[in-house]
Amino acid sequence: MDRLTLKILVGMQPAGDNWSTNFWAAIQAVDFKGLELDLLQFATLKIKDLSMSQSGDVAEFKADGVEVEILSKRIATVTVQIFNRAGESGFLAFVAPQPISSWFQVNWLLAGHNIAIPDDIVADLITINPNGGDDTDQLGTDLANANLIPAPGQGNGSWLFGAGIHIADQVLLGRAVFQDEGFCGIALHSALLKEWFNLDISIGVAYRRGSRPEQDTFFVALTVPQVTLPAFDFMGGVISLEIAMNGDFKLDVGFPSLASNGVARSWDRCFGAVVGIFQGSGGFYLTKGTPGAVQTITGLRLGGGYAIQAGFGAAFGAGIFSVVVTIGIYAIVEGEFVLDNGKLVQFRLSGAIGVLFRGVGQLNWWVISVTVSVVVAAEARTTIEWTTGSKVNIDFDFTVYASASAQACIGGRWFHLCKSISVSIPMRVHYPVQIG
């Protein structure tokens, strides 16, 4: 066990109108790091992070990164969250089973009840990575960090189910998510399109029910493949569009949005190009209104963001080996403004600068293929928020993010077995300031 934290309360028990002399003690919160439970040497549970807490009317249990082993063989990684808020309870379970067969593989399973999934998580669930992968570790981490507890009285008691699968090792890669009286979505990708037509694309579509019929939204995401031209290499990215029946929308063209932990960015969504030793990438998004939220008749919410990254890149290759590395600096600007009857009542401005390093190495020899990728980023970010009648909030964030992933495969085109592993290290220092 790496760490055990207990929050213990001690007090006096009230008796009628008077205070009793009897003392009581209670454990209000528990936090474990690196807990391992061995059940008679048959089953083993290795828990990355486990916590039980109560704050106000919310009681919550979380278990993140639970590795389940049977007879010393890992069979699944599980993330579980259970909560109760003012008598309304719910749960979420995310399971990533270990691969058994390359012909049919379940990448992840999702089940939940009475939860509120943020819009960005919904988009991630039905967007397949441009490289055709399915990062279950990142999905599990994003769900564990997200606030899934509905606001008081907003729980609708609906059920949520989802799954991600591989068939014949990416001949068909799919995701599907369904929430009764909420939303449904599906995403598909096929390696055959790349083999036959050199189109490494995937598409995802979804429908989400709003609080009113005019706030029902439709979501479409499309990956654009990488294209090699005589003069330069065009790097693929992701385009997504969310549009509501009342005209609200969000158009995202390769913007590297922040993950739920406020540290990592999805740089693989960006569009870019490599020309000689130089490389660059970027993206933008535009929003109008708040799809799925209740609006006032005279209210209007506008927002947008722009990101650009530029630097140097190099590719090395000799026979069975190939390595591509890029390093650059980037700048990101985001803003959101709320107008009521033509008057500014709220705004948020954010600016960030940083350094980004990415490297990918590949080994292809006979029936063995190995791919290793590394991402390291450091960022300084400032966010200013103001609402009419309140103080100005300024947040200073300094983050460092490092991730590494590897995949090893043995076999030919149609028959092979693959094993993947990934690890990430997010670090964040946050300084809030109020003015006024």
Image (cartoon, rainbow, N blue to C red):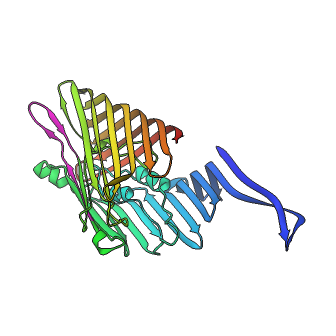
Residue 229 image offset from top left, x and y in percent: 10, 35
Q: Quadrant of residue 313?
A: top left
Residue 352 image offset from top left, x and y in percent: 38, 35
Is the magenta region chiefly helix, strand or loop? Answer: strand
- Vertical placement of residue 179 versus 169, above or below: below
Instruction: Examine the structure image and report whether residue 342 is included in the region drawn in magenta.
Output: no
Residue 406 image offset from top left, x and y in percent: 37, 41
Horizontal placement of 216 versus 262: left or right? Answer: left
- Vertical placement of residue 307 versus 168, above or below: above
- Vertical placement of residue 416 versus 318, above or below: below
Could you tell me which residue is drawn at 55 percent across and 73 percent down?
88
Residue 76 visible, this orientation: no
**What residue range appears in magenta?**
218-237
Residue 317 image offset from top left, x and y in percent: 23, 27
Q: Residue furthest right?
A: 21
Q: Closer to the camera, 61 or 79?
A: 61
- Vertical placement of residue 193 versus 322, above or below: below
Q: Closer to the camera, 378 or 342?
A: 342
Could you tell me which residue is drawn at 63 percent across and 55 percent down?
37
Horizontal placement of 20 versus 344: left or right? Answer: right
Could you tell me which residue is drawn at 58 percent across and 68 percent down?
84
How many labels were placed on the picture?
Answer: 0
Residue 110 visible, this orientation: yes
Instruction: Examine the structure image and report whether residue 225 is included in the region drawn in magenta.
Output: yes
Q: Quadrant of residue 121?
A: bottom left
Q: Quadrant of residue 162?
A: bottom left
